[in-house]
Image (cartoon, helix red, strand yellow):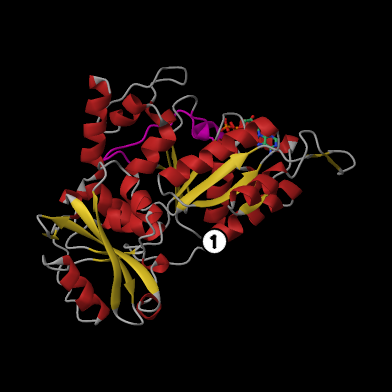
Amino acid sequence: MSEEKNKAADSLKAITESKELTDRMGKIKHKIMVLSGKGGVGKSTVAANIAVSLALEGGKVGLLDTDFHGPSIPTLLNLEGKRPGSDGKAILPIEFSEGLKVMSIGFLLQNKDDAVIWRGPMKMKVIKQLRDEPLSVAQLIPGMDGAVIITTPQNLSLNDVKKCINFCRQLSVPVLGVVENMSGLICPNCKTIINVFKTGGGEKMASEMGVPFLGKIPIDPQIVEASDSGKPFVYHYGKTEAAKAFTGVVQPLLQMGDKTESGAETVLSKEEKKEGMHKIAIPVVEGHLSAHFGHCEEFAIFDVDFENKKIVRQEKAPSPPHEPGLLPRWLAEKGVNIIIAGGMGTQAQQLFANSGITVSVGASAGDPEKLIISYMDNALELGDNTCDH
Ligand code: ADP
């Protein structure tokens, strides 16, 4: 790694672990990332229309446009030339309408054609250094609900989407679904659909990759017209087939249940987890449970038969390097579905919850085998989270 990248990684780590960021992000009930494998497939258009649709459904929505290479959200929502204010600590988003606030890298440019110049409380310069927008966003935003991936029906675009899905999997970001944009053209005269770039490839690919398919949005010349004049399409052309298609796409997003900060929604209930075979990991330092999850040397991993209250197998595995998103993946690949920890930050808890791993925090330092036995007997005492950051 170059020195610049090392520095960037350090600052990124500092930001990610900052309590302020975690606290603020914790107040947002759902966080959805919209991404695509390549440019020009309609990522910004779809993201803006999803945000407007969610706001129209009564949601309080924030749209963050981190596109470095041509942030188009200000144009799409007629917010060009707006300058965000500041409360001295943070940059404040622009209110587009009741229920929709917007922040875009475009607002931070001196003028539309400038390179990105950062001013003020620009911790985000890290993003600039890393350049890789989706990666930075996924790492900076704790507890992401998941990603919506935009594609067009052509094979080239579909191949890029497979990479996107794998990227999400590597970072333990759940894929909420794939949207096939520019899927057929509705003839402005006779209203029949002409399949310009084929159709259905997105749906087939989603099923092959085992991810949900959220719907197809047709090509509609009015989308271009609306976008160019800064009118949100779903609002101004609500009766069109394309607007109805957007409504279909947001339905599964509206169904997302309420979640607690620790992602309790995805966590198994106590009754469920105390049946059958389970794999439990305990972070260990000097032979005892490590009070700080991030500082452990190794993991003690136990195969446990809850019905017969027996430890069937145990192993020790050295902790892998602490890279963002790596531990949940590494433990999930080992088949671990329960972690007993001393202290763990809420962001890490969320990542594990997203990987289907239940975390019990607040166990006190002790011999891992004894902790497992107490756990099986429902006698494990859980105190305060010893390192909630
Ligand atoms: P990206 O953010 O992926 O680069 P954009 O959202 O900027 O892509 O879309 C690229 C162009 O395609 C824009 O001119 C936009 O108006 C147009 N576009 C996007 N989706 C559609 C659609 N379904 N029908 C017609 N034009 C579309």
Is 186 located above or below residue 100 in the figure? above
x, y percent for residue 74? 50, 33
Magenta stretch: includes residue 90? yes
Q: Is residue 186 left or right of residue 308?
A: right
Residue at the image point whose x is 33% and y is 49% from the top: 142
Magenta stretch: includes residue 120? no
> Residue at the top extreme?
114
Using a 10 Å C-alpha cutoff, classify the residue at mark 1 as few (fewer than 14 neighbours), some (14 to 19) or many (20 or more). few
Give the extent of the magenta segment: 71-92
> Residue at the front extreme?
313
Q: In terms of image quadrants, where is residue 23?
A: bottom left
Is 145 located above or below residue 338 in the figure? above
Q: Which amino acid lies under the numbered mark 1 shown in the image of this protein?
A: Leu
Secondary structure of the residue carrying tag 1 is helix
x, y percent for residue 198? 78, 37
x, y percent for residue 178? 60, 47
Query: As rendered, which of 15 and 276 lies closer to the eye?
Result: 276
Residue at the image point whose x is 56% and y is 48% from the top: 50
**Residue 237 visible from this viewpoint:** no
Query: As rendered, which of 118 and 110 lies closer to the eye?
Result: 118
Q: How many marks?
A: 1
Query: As rendered, which of 339 and 69 lies closer to the eye?
Result: 339
Where is the N terminus found, in terms of image quarters?
A: top left
Residue at the image point whose x is 57% and y is 30% from the top: 38
Ligand 1 appears in which quadrant? top right
Is 282 located above or below residue 233 in the figure? below
Q: Residue beneath label 1, please?
A: 254
Q: In terms of image quadrants, where is residue 358?
A: bottom left
Query: As rendered, which of 60 and 328 lies closer to the eye?
Result: 328
Q: In terms of image quadrants, where is residue 231?
A: top right
Residue at the image point whose x is 36% and y is 64% from the top: 337
